[in-house]
Image (tube, rainbow, N blue to C red):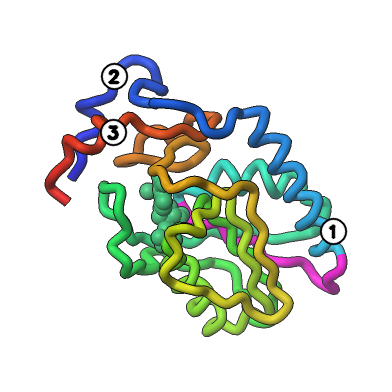
Amino acid sequence: PAQASAMVSGAPDAGIEWVLWTEAEIAARVAEVAAELGADLRRLREPAVVVGVATGAFLFLADLVRRVDAPLAVDFVRAESYGDGTESSGRPRITSDLKVDVAGKHVVVVEDIVDTGNTVSCLIAHLEKKGASSISVCTFLDKPSRRSANFQLVGDGKFYRCFECPDYFVVGYGMDFAELYRNLPYVGVLKAEMYKKDTSN
Ligand code: 5GP
Ligand code: MG
Ligand code: MG
């Protein structure tokens, strides 16, 4: 596994090569997406269930839902496909399940980033099995160039995204490398030397 804690010391942004989206750019765009999602959720006859994918979506979910002007429930799932490296294993597992019953409910899956699409496909199948009547996906970042699993939304589900992300491994605003950098208020690209030292996975 990566030894990021040994490589990073001092400032929380040590190891960031450059910034892709600043805190202000993120706030402005999240507000736009929240307005769009809120307008859609207000048309429903009952509250939606917003399902955050832990841990990466925690900041985005918090910023998003406080700007969504509609009744909703919040819950989390944990899905893991990465070890501590920068490549997905391609076989995501749900390692912590929902508490809220989603049968017959409109579900909005909130993700930090949709990359290959494997995680979101796995979650959609899982939520569909639990009887969700519609499934939308709201992702902070979307890396369409990396897609290998073509996921299908359910019912009247929609796909929302804040930004299209170029093909870099990014950190910050909830996203980690070996559990670090999640607390950065912006999104940045790691210096290659931060993870190229890691040859064990
Ligand atoms: P996917 O299953 O779509 O390939 O990726 C799912 C998860 O992998 C994302 O939700 C995210 O947690 C992680 N991931 C994918 N790309 C990146 C990236 O560039 N940076 C970080 N920190 N995590 C990523
Ligand atoms: Mg994620
Ligand atoms: Mg991660």
Whole-percent x, y for residue 89 in the image: 28, 62
Closer to the camera: disc 3 or disc 2? 3
Q: CA distance from mark 2 to mark 1?
A: 44 Å
* SS for callout 2: loop
Badge 3 amino acid:
Ala
Asked if the residues shown at circle 3 and circle 2 are in contact, with their CB atoms under 8 angstroms apart, the answer is no
Give the residue number, with chain letter if any, for mark 2: 9
Badge 1 amino acid:
Ala
Mark 3, Cα crowd under 10 Å, few <14 / some 14-19 / many 20+, is: few
Whole-percent x, y for residue 164 in the image: 57, 49
Give the residue number, with chain letter if any, for mark 1: 39
Mark 1, Cα crowd under 10 Å, few <14 / some 14-19 / many 20+, is: some
- Figure quadrant of residue 88: bottom left
* Residue found 59% across the figure and 63% down from its top: 109
Closer to the camera: disc 1 or disc 3? 3
Q: Does the magenta run of residues contain 49?
A: yes
Left or right of 195? Residue 158 is: right
Q: CA distance from mark 3 to mark 2?
A: 17 Å
**Is the residue indicated by label 2 positioned so its CB lies within 8 Å of ligand 1?**
no
**In the depicted view, which residue is nearer to us: 88 or 129?**
88
Whole-percent x, y for residue 171 in the image: 43, 38
Left or right of 200? Residue 38 is: right
Give the residue number, with chain letter if any, for mark 3: 192
